[in-house]
Amino acid sequence: PYLLLINHASMVDFKVMLKATHPRRINNVMSIEGFNDYTEPLMRSLGVIGTRKYISDIHLIKNMKYSIEVLKNIFVVFPEARYSLDGCTSYIPDSIGKAAKLLKVPVVVLKIRGNYVTCPQWNLKNKRTYLEAVMEQIVTLDEMKTITPEEINARIKEHFQYDDFK
C-alpha cells in the first residue's frame, strides 16, 4: 500500500489513475457533493470515500488508515481538491504532509500533463490531444521513519509542478 497523490484538471485523470494502478485495488476521496452527481451505491462500489472539502475530518483519516492497514489498498488523494482552472499547479495544503506521516506508507506522485488541454472541466469534449503521465515515488517506506511532515510537503510541492501550456 502507498499514498498516491495526483494533479487534477479533468475527468480524464480518473482513467489515467485506473490505468496506472491496475490491477491493484484503490480507495479515493471525493467531496460529498460528488455523490449527488453520481449514485452513492456506484461510488461506494468503486471504493470512493465521501468527505466535505476544506475541513478537518477525523473519520476520513480513520478510513484512510483502514484502507491502507487492513485492506492493503492504494489510497488516492487529489491534494489540490478541485479541477485546475488554468492547467497549472494549484495550492497544496500543508496538512497532506502530516497525513502522509500519520499513514506511515510510501508517497507516490502521479503527475498528468496535457489533461487540461485535452479535456478541461469547462469543455467536456475530449479533444484527444497529447497526454503524458509520470508516476514517481517521492518518499520511501524507510525514509518515512525519519522524514518530517515539512520535508514531505517540500517534496510533494517540488514534484507536483506542472503547466499544461509548456
Image: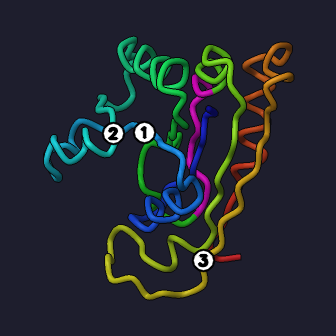
Could you classify mark 3 by the number of other residues whose Cα lies within 10 Å: few (under 14), some (14-19), or many (20 or more)?
A: some
Q: Report the residue at 78% width, 33% height from top.
A: 154
Would you name the residue on which mark 3 appears?
131
Q: Report the residue at 86% width, 14% height from top.
A: 146
Amino acid carrying mark 3 in the image: Leu
| Image: magenta residue range | 88-96
Q: Is residue 16 above or below residue 161?
A: below
Quadrant of the drawing holding the N terminus:
top right
Disc number for residue 143: none
Closer to the N terminus: mark 2 or mark 3? 2
Amino acid carrying mark 2 in the image: Val
Q: Nearer the viewer, mark 2 or mark 3?
A: 2
> Looking at the image, which is closer to me, 35 or 84?
35
Q: Which of the 4 image quadrants contains residue 152? A: top right
Whether 37 is among the magenta residues is: no
Residue 137 percent across, percent down from the top left: 77, 43
Mark 2 near mark 3, Cβ–Cβ under 8 Å? no
Amino acid carrying mark 1 in the image: Asn
* SS for dot 2: strand
Q: Nearer the viewer, mark 3 or mark 1?
A: 1
What separation in Å lies between label 3 and label 1 (alpha carbons)? Answer: 22 Å
* SS for dot 3: loop
What separation in Å lies between label 2 and label 1 (alpha carbons)? Answer: 5 Å
Mark 2 near mark 1, Cβ–Cβ under 8 Å? yes
Would you name the residue on which mark 1 appears?
28
Disc number for residue 48: 2
* SS for dot 1: strand
Whether 93 is among the magenta residues is: yes
Q: Report the residue at 40% width, 11% height from top.
A: 58
